[in-house]
Structure formats: C-alpha cells, structure tokens
Image (tube, rainbow, N blue to C red):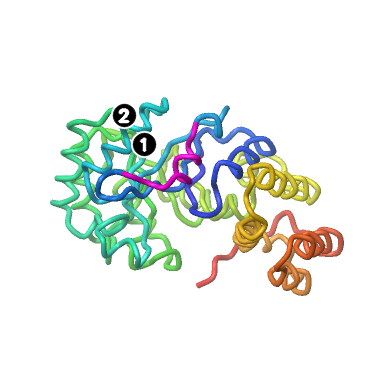
C-alpha cells in the first residue's frame, strides 16, 4: 500500500511537512496546499515560499493548483517546472462556498464538458505531469460515471478520489460503493482513495470495498495522529513524548521562520483541533489552550496538557457532524 499526505490549507505548510518527515519518516509523497492564481497566473508570495525547493529538501512534494482558467494553470505550472517540479495537481475537489461558485475546486465538476475543455487545453501544452484530486460530483455520486468518462481521456499521473460529492462537504459518509465501482472498472492511470481513514479498521473497510487498491491519501486522520502512516503499516502507536517533541519542533520551526506569534498560535490551535482527541477527558486543559492569546499562556496550557492530561495513543479521531 502506498500512502500520500493530503494538502490541508493552514495546516500542512512546509514547516509542518519538514517536521513531520523528520519525526515520522517514510511518507512517499506530500501535496502542498493549493496555489490560487488570478486570471493572469499571478499568486501570493506565501504560496511560492511554501513550494520553494530549499524549503522542501528531502521531500517528494507535489504542488497543487486551484483555478478555473487553463491559461492561469499553465502559467503556474511553467513557474513550478522552472523550480524543478515534474508534476502538479489540479484541485477539483475543494467544497468551499467561496470557491465553488467561481467554478473552481469542486465547482469544476458542475459541467463535465467545461472540465473536458479545461483538461484538453492543459494537456495540450503542459510542461509537467498532471494529477487530479476530485470529488464524486457536485450534488451526487451519480454524477461520477460521466466525470470518469472525461478523466479517462487524459494521461493523468494519478486520480485521487475523495469519495463524497461536494454536497457532503466533510460530513456525509464516504460513498464506498461508488468509489469501488469506478476503481473496479479501471482506468489508464493509478487511482488513489481519500476520505475518512482514521484508523486501521477504516483502511480495512476501504480495502475490502475495493480489492487491489494500492494508493491511499490521508488528510484529517494524519493531522489528528501524525504517526498514522506508521500505524497503518503495522508500526508502533504514537507516544506522548514523541508528540510533545513534535509539537515543540513545530513551534520552534515557525519562530525560526519569522512567523509572528499571532499566526503561530492560530496555526497551532487549528492543528490541535485534530490532535486534541488523543487527550480524552482533558476539557480544562483544552479550554486553556484554546483561550490562550499570548505565547507564554499557550505554552503553559500545552505543558499542562502533556503533564496532567490523559493520553490515549489508540484514540480515533471522530470528525464533527
């Protein structure tokens, strides 16, 4: 089984990726949070900094692009090729209400003919390999066979399928039968599964639904338990001290990069939204952590959590519904 780390905006930036790879080595491929260019292909400096080769040494990284303009996509792809990348990923799955109405992310799935035209132009001039991260459709998984007709026309490096339509956001149950049907029918490119794998039992359930599946992308599950890749391959469970050191290295890495205290706190609290499940019952410590407005208060709350909070290495993240 081959695993890859999904892009998570605000969570899996280059400091997180480098730190994760140091403490939990062995992830074959990371995907960078999306680059969102304007109509001329221009994008924010922070997005460039995130994918600079010097910030991702030793990692197998695939940058992701979110846009509805083939010209803008190709412009960014050219810049990434100049940096040495040989593959980019098209985001055709983001369900955000600020993205979809602009026909970006999962909004690209509303019109298969337009998606086809986009891919036709991109593949006619692409300077790099292209993979796609998609959902099953906009409103229903019943839309997916038509979308697969489109995808099968192009030499994708891989198709990563988040097994929900956009309407399910991250709350509905993954539609394993729909995914399995597409996987069993086959494609001229590798197919990867994404969606609600938080523990070995979840992986077993997906593998049973789609025998022969070899590629899995983890997102929230890996943010919730940074050792999940290791656990899913039969390795040791996460240890409290291991998590403590990982956290300290993340904070130190952000400080060294010149990130402001305010932004460090914001990013770490977003990460703790996922990781706090490993401290069941630690309501008081979690409340203090989330209330902290200054770094000394935050570090004090984290210290209390690790010192007095009950740590369960086998706790399974349960996403809010």
Q: In the depicted view, which residue is nearer to us: 274 or 44?
A: 44
Q: In the depicted view, which residue is nearer to us: 49 or 88?
A: 49
Residue assigned mark 1: 88
The magenta segment is: 42-52
Q: Residue at x 46, y 50 (%)?
A: 206
Q: Which of the 4 quarters of the picture holds residue 236?
A: top right
Residue 207 visible: no
Q: Earlier in the sequence, mark 1 or mark 2?
A: 1
Crowdedness near tag 1: few (<14), some (14–19) or many (≥20) residues, C-alpha within 10 Å: many
Q: In the depicted view, which residue is nearer to us: 295 or 320?
A: 295
Q: Residue at x 78, y 74 (%)?
A: 284
Residue contact between numbered discs 1 and 2, judged by CB atoms under 8 Å? yes
The spot of residue 169 in percent (x, y) is 40, 65
The spot of residue 194 in percent (x, y) is 44, 50
Q: Which of the 4 quarters of the picture holds residue 15?
A: top right
| Helix, strand or loop under label 1 | strand
Considering the whole magenta stretch, tell me its main secondary structure: helix
Distance Cα–Cα, label 1 vs label 2: 7 Å
Q: In the depicted view, which residue is nearer to us: 163 or 24?
A: 24
Left or right: where does residue 179 sit relative to residue 54? left
Q: Residue at x 26, y 43 (%)?
A: 72
Residue assigned mark 2: 128
Residue 155 visible: yes
| Helix, strand or loop under label 2 | loop
Q: Residue at x 41, y 60 (%)?
A: 174
Residue 139 belongs to magenta span? no
Crowdedness near tag 2: few (<14), some (14–19) or many (≥20) residues, C-alpha within 10 Å: some
The spot of residue 190 in percent (x, y) is 35, 35
């Amino acid at each position: 089984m081959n695993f890859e780390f999904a892009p998570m905006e605000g969570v899996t930036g280059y400091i997180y990726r480098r730190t994760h790879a140091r403490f939990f080595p062995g992830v074959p491929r990371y995907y960078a949070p999306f680059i969102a260019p304007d109509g001329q292909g221009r994008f924010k400096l922070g997005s460039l900094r995130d994918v600079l080769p010097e910030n991702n040494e030793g990692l197998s990284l695939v940058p992701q692009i979110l846009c509805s303009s083939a010209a803008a996509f190709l412009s960014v792809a050219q810049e990434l090729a100049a940096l040495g990348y040989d593959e980019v990923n098209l985001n055709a799955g983001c369900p955000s209400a600020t993205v979809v109405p602009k026909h970006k992310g999962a909004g690209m799935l509303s019109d298969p003919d337009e998606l086809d035209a986009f891919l036709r132009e991109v593949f006619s001039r692409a300077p790099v390999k292209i993979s796609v991260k998609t959902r099953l459709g906009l409103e229903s998984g019943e839309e997916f066979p038509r979308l697969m007709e489109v995808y099968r026309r192009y030499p994708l490096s891989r198709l990563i399928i988040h097994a929900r339509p956009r309407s399910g956001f991250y709350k509905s149950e993954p539609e394993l039968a729909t995914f399995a049907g597409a996987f069993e029918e086959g494609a001229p490119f590798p197919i990867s599964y994404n969606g609600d794998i938080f523990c070995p039992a979840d992986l077993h359930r997906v593998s049973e639904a789609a025998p022969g599946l070899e590629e899995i992308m983890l997102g929230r599950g890996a943010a919730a338990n940074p050792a999940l890749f290791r656990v899913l391959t039969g390795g040791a469970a996460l240890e409290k001290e291991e998590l403590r050191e990982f956290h300290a290295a993340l904070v130190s890495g952000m400080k060294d990069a010149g990130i402001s205290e305010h932004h460090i706190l914001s990013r770490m609290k977003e990460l703790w939204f996922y990781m706090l499940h490993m401290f069941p019952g630690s309501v008081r410590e979690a409340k203090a952590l989330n209330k902290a407005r200054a770094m000394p208060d935050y570090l004090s709350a984290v210290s209390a959590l690790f010192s007095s909070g009950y740590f369960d290495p086998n706790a399974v993240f349960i996403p809010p519904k």
